[in-house]
Image (spheres, rainbow, N blue to C red):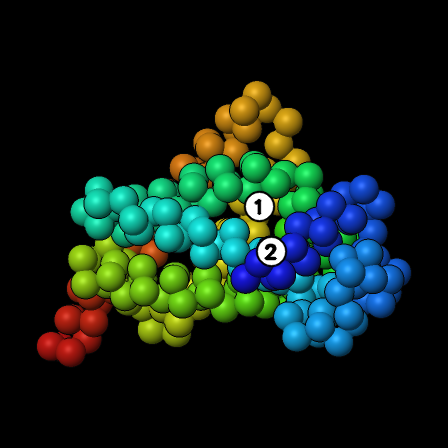
Amino acid sequence: METLEKIRKAYTEYVLENGKQPTSVFQFAKKLKLAEADFYNYYASFDAIEADVWLAFFQDAKATVEADDTYQGYSVREKLLAFYYTWIELLKAQRSFVTYSYTRLREEGAAASPIAKARMRSSQLKTSSRVLQPFREAFFDYARDLLAEGRESKEVEPRPFVTDRYPNALWSQTLFLLDFWVRDVSRNFEKTDTAIEKAVNTAFDLIGRSPLDTLFDFAKFIYQNK
């Protein structure tokens, strides 16, 4: 664990001081007085280090909210709000690195799709990137658990052909909030707090029961009993 932390700390400092990844694993490991082969015992590449950092941000935020006794009594909507607020607070502590890594990933996505360069936003972020993949997979597990709980509490309405896409929608929302925070220049990122509240409330208004669901149930009843 000590060596893992040492590698991650050295990598973070390097990219912030140089604005790019190290030239080679050999040179990077040498500065750490670490054999190149030993480096590969921990990470397969520099991208793997960044992936680990992004995953750690998520895991730390999740562990923090779940350790709070009051969190267990929250509604699903409130749980997601608490997670996002906590996640952003943790990101603030390493904003320079988050901004560097996020910008690099966006640029990679633009390079893969030249037409998108002029309108690059979170929706064009390369979500299949190896850097984000561990974070994405862990978030999907978390989202599925929340949504399952929401179905039991009637906060989430099951809908044919749509329900399975809810985790994707929440992941897109996560990327939107990340993008918003990176660009936010308001004092203490107050606008991001507002964006989180509005985004989560809108999401649960959409995936919760609505008058359209009542209308659909009524139409289904009429059809089955005509």
Where does label 2 land, which residue? 5
Which residue corresponds to mark 1? 178
- Checking the image for residue 62, the label placed there is none
Amino acid at dot 2: Glu
For marks 2 and 1, give the CA distance.
Answer: 24 Å
Residue sitting nearer the eye, 47 or 197: 47
Dot 1: element: helix
Measured from the top left, where is residue 135 in percent x and y?
A: 53, 62
Q: Hey, which quadrant is residue 199 in on the image? A: top left
- Point 66% across, 75% down: residue: 41
Q: Amino acid at mark 1?
A: Leu
**Quadrant in which residue 207 is drawn:** bottom left
Which of the two residues, 23 or 32, is positioned nearer the viewer here?
A: 32
Quarter location, residue 69:
top left
Q: Is residue 87 left or right of residue 53?
A: left
Question: How far across and down, in percent of the image, does residue 104 sit?
Answer: 76, 53
